[in-house]
Image: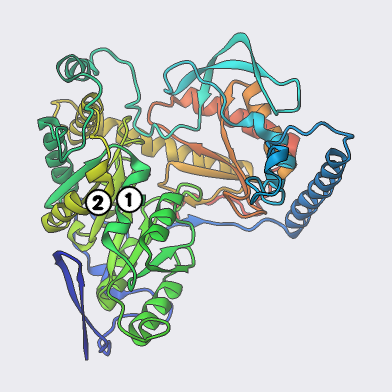
Amino acid sequence: MARMADLPRNGSLTFQTSQDHSKSTTSKNGFHRSCQENGISNGVHHRSRVTEGFEQPPMYVAVFTYLGFGIVTLFGYLRDFMRAVGLEKCHVAQEREEQKDFVPLYQDFENFYTRNLYMRVRDNWNRPICSLPGPEFDLMERVTDDYNWTFRLTGKTIHGVINMGSYNYLGFAENNADFLKTVAETTMDYGLGVCSTRQEMGNMDIHQELEELVAMFLGTESAVSFGMGFATNSMNIPALVSKGCLILSDELNHTSLILGSRLSGATIRVFKHNNMQSLEKMLKEAVTNGQSRTHRPWKKILIVVEGVYSMEGSIVRLAEIVALKKKYKAYLYLDEAHSIGAVGPTGRGVTEHFGVDPSDVDVMMGTFTKSFGAAGGYIAGKKELVDYLRTYSHSAVYASAMSPPVARQIIRAMKCIMGQDGTTVGIERLRQLGENTRYFRRRLQEMGFIIYGSRDSPVVPLLVYMPGKVGAFSRAMLERKIGVVVVGFPATPITEARARFCVSSSHTREMLDKVLHALDELGDYLGIKFSRRRYIDELDS
């Protein structure tokens, strides 16, 4: 028995699904021996091991974390009561008196977290930067007179803050006049804005040059670019799947992927993070049982994953997912926002990292906002897929075309990575990023911190756990002229608040050592060195 499914108006994604899997090479733990037979991509042998760390903290850490949230919540209800009876001033947006009988615009319970928890640590976000966001930046000093409800600038500037939060992986967010000469020339020739969509008057030769270069860089037939990275996911997934289709989404996927999946109208099922047993179980059920009520075959089954997960620092188990995708005749959508340019010996992402043929990935998505120091995103794959998206993607049809200087910056950075600029700057930056990443991760583990993710991932989450320590950590780091990003619930699980470091090739060893010294000092002061494992150098094991 076989199943047929067609993407509407796109014959290139037609597939047949056979339910005869008697020749499967899957072992009991879900690992596919066939994935070890993947060829060599870009002349680089793939890695057969996926080495990641997700160490669990001692039990008392979870207990005190829940206790901390409980205490803050209790005081939150007390303060809400005081606001209701007029004992405390209420700063929250409210409906006017004549609108009280309408459906409420502001739900008290929904805003409870914002009023009583987020406001306590609001000063750690949206800090105004007044310089280039390179390895160091300048920060405008601000203070609050009403407990973070409003801020005012003091007129002072904090200079030389080490930037450990931007996604400037290869240091292309720079202001070197020699490097940016072509970008300046493009600005003079084309101006800044296009003021039209690609289908009308905004399709320029520089956009076509960019897309041809992206396809060459990735090793795909074609590519299409978009002006916004978030919209690349949220507006293109609805063009690929719809009602009657099934999306299998990793539980830690980015919000843009989640939004795009919801907008599509397709059925969404979530599998455990990087868990091949969980994914295969869902694939098997989908192929065997079909749709929930009618048991009709799914029109399409789309697996949606990321290359590097931005909050965990983990790398997708691509080779195994490709093996599952082939076995069950599903489609694969790969978001390489944080991996393209930052992972792989020549920066070509997780396909190069694992030696997977790019043609085995049906939809390759990525952004230009990280490694390329620009803006926008792309989707690459077969020419039929790209042509289809040019016609039916809302982002391609209705959004303004990419700014020409931005496109030139991407071309400049990509040619530098590929060595087409006649220099070795690109490959040197890639090597430096790898060295910085492994050094920074190794030192943190030696100090006793719990960090998540792969040893090759430049995204380094350091677990803080307790809500009261999140704000204290960020403020103390800023006092030492180090800018960090702290993240907590609801962006992370309630017990896993963290600081997320993004390592860059532009960080010098002196900068990293200064950050590490501050972390070692604060780790002892705040008591956040929770690791119970001694570090073992994986290269020597």
Q: Which of 538 and 185 is in front in this view?
A: 185
Image point (14%, 32%), residue name: 201
Quadrant of residue 40 within the rendered picture: bottom left
The three-letter code of the residue at mark 1 reads Met
Q: Do the residues labelled 1 and 2 touch (CB within 8 Å)?
A: yes
Q: Name the residue under label 1.
A: 235
Task: Name the secondary structure under disc 2.
Answer: loop
Question: Does the image show residue 27?
Answer: no
Q: Where is residue 52 in the image (x, y as percent from the top left)?
A: 47, 56
Q: Position of residue 302 (x, y in %)?
A: 32, 67
As drawn, is 161 to the left or to the right of 57?
left
Quarter the N terminus occupies? bottom left
Quarter the C terminus occupies? bottom left
> How far apart in space, not on screen, are marks 1 and 2 (Cα)?
6 Å
Question: Which residue of the protein is positioned furthest toward the front in this rendering?
Answer: 98
As drawn, is 175 to the left or to the right of 329?
right
- Please tell me the numbered disc located at residue 393: 2
Quadrant of residue 333 within the rendered picture: bottom left
Q: Where is residue 200 in the image (x, y as percent from the top left)?
A: 15, 37
Q: Nearer the viewer, residue 130 or 529?
A: 130
